[in-house]
Amino acid sequence: MSAPEHGLLERRLIIITGKGGTGKTSVSAALALLAARRGLRVCVAEMALESRIPALFGSSEAAAGEDHEIHPGVTAVRIEPYAALAEYLGLQFGGRRVAEWVLGNQAFRQLMDAAPGWRELITLGKVWHLEQMERADGTPRWDLLIVDAPATGHGLTFLDVPRVAVAAVRVGPLRRHASWVEEMIEDKRRTILLPVALAEELPARETTELVERVRRDVGVAVDRVVVNAVSPAPFPEQVPDLDVRLARLPADTGQGRLPPPATLAACARHLRERRELNVRHLETIAEGTSLPMITLPLLPEGVLDVDDLARLADAFEADPRLAA
């Protein structure tokens, strides 16, 4: 497999997805931190019911749709479909008052709740708007936009909605706006989909299926995979059989100052088997996707704050061929 043609941080838009529980929100935040380290102005957008990223940076959450700086160089925003729809209608009608009146109508709400696809389309429209925003001097407000997208499965439906809308609606502002979003998603120099996996059976299989479906059905670039929470090699190179050696020690080794050798051997064996399992599934992902991988370390306590994010950002930075 060859190295990606473009560096990860050379894109304008990185859409991060993956099976639930793989840590894609933490990866989104760590990648934003890395980009800010390199002097980029970054906006990281979440689509969850509640924001998690501001808390990782030690910041508070703002109202849906409002962007706010959570770290030097890093701005966060949570995209909520109805708030984004109110903003869109306000632009179309020339004021928020009419939009609020429309959205306050119970019948309209019931119709929208039953209508498929509009949440995805309006959310991506908000992403497009964020990507287009400019500073007073005409330069982009943000150099990079990172989107913590829905989990695998819904994530692909989410990305395919603009194409469906363009095919279904022939004229009018909806088709025009959907075509702008579709163009953004399919611009391979501008946008990339970044799957996040774990080196475990189900996430590995789902990541392989995700990449296959993207290549077959969705016109978005995917040229690498992030594998999160990879266990490190547990023993020094000089003693790769440390667990076996511990098991051979006499039972009274340590004279009470240490756990019995059998206990130490069992713990060491668990670490070795966990590492071997990870390596097998890394091979599965590599073979199934034919894509290079960025591996991030397992943090035993999880990702709790900006110091933990910095450790993940360091791991990104340690692989410049893939993350440059």
Image: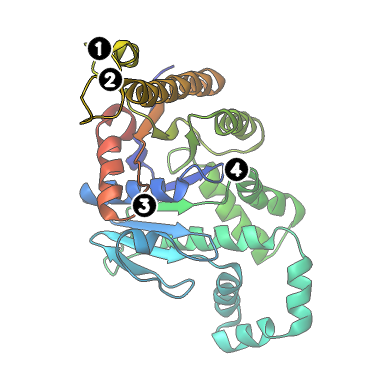
Query: What residue is shown with label 2?
Result: 235
Give the residue type that dot 2 points to: Phe
Label 4–label 2 contact, CB within 8 A: no
Disc 1 designates what residue? 239
Vertical placement of residue 59 versus 147, above or below: below
Residue ID at (46%, 46%): 24
The quadrant holding residue 315 is top left
Residue 183: image location, x then y, percent: 55, 48
Q: Residue 152 carries which label?
A: 4
Amino acid of disc 4: Thr
Mark 1 belongs to which amino acid? Val
Q: Which of the two residues, 221 or 205, is positioned nearer the viewer here?
A: 205
Tell which circle, 3 or 4, labels the residue nearer the N-terminal end.
3
Q: Which of marks 1 and 3 is nearer the N terminus?
A: 3
- Measure the C-alpha gap from mark 2 to mark 3: 30 Å
Q: Which residue is drawn at 37% across and 58% down?
A: 43
Q: Which amino acid does label 3 sit on?
A: Ala
